[in-house]
Image (cartoon, helix red, strand yellow):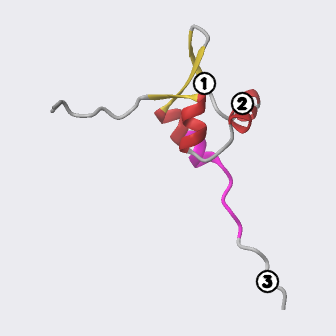
Amino acid sequence: MNDAPKLDKLAYSLEEFAEAVSLSYAQILRHIANDELIAKYSGRKALILRAEGERFLRALPEARAPKVRS
């Protein structure tokens, strides 16, 4: 049995990040293309750093309550 502590991920592949935040892979690519989400690259492998993912999520617009008709 491995008793070594599990390290939190420092970076996510685009697929992993999309799954973690419940967005599609295509949506993640659009956010990168629009400079809303910054990917780092190791060769051709795109990675989203944990801190960048958190910054991106905090920057998303807040949901507004639906208007109630009277």
Where is residue 5? Give x, y as percent: 21, 33
Circle 3 packing at 10 Å, graded few (<14), some (14-19), many (20+), is: few
The residue lying at 76 percent from left, 31 percent from top is: 34
Helix, strand or loop under label 1: loop
Q: Which mark is residue 29?
A: 2
Relative to 47, 32 lies left or right: right
Which mark is first along the chain, 2 or 3?
A: 2
Q: Position of residue 23 (x, y in %)?
A: 66, 44
Q: Give the magenta range.
A: 55-64
| Mark 1 and mark 3: Cα distance apart in space | 40 Å
Dot 1 alpha-carbon crowd within 10 angstroms: few under 14, some 14 to 19, many 20 or more: many
Residue 39, label in figure: 1
Q: Is residue 24 magenta?
A: no
Q: Nearer the viewer, residue 60 or 15?
A: 15
What's the mark number on residue 65? none
Residue 64, placed above or below residue 43: below
**Amino acid type of the residue that numbered disc 3 sits on in the rendered structure:** Val
- Residue at point 74% right, 34% down? 26
Q: What type is the residue that disc 1 sits on?
A: Ala
Residue identified by numbered label 3? 68
Mark found first going from the N terminus, 1 or 3: 1
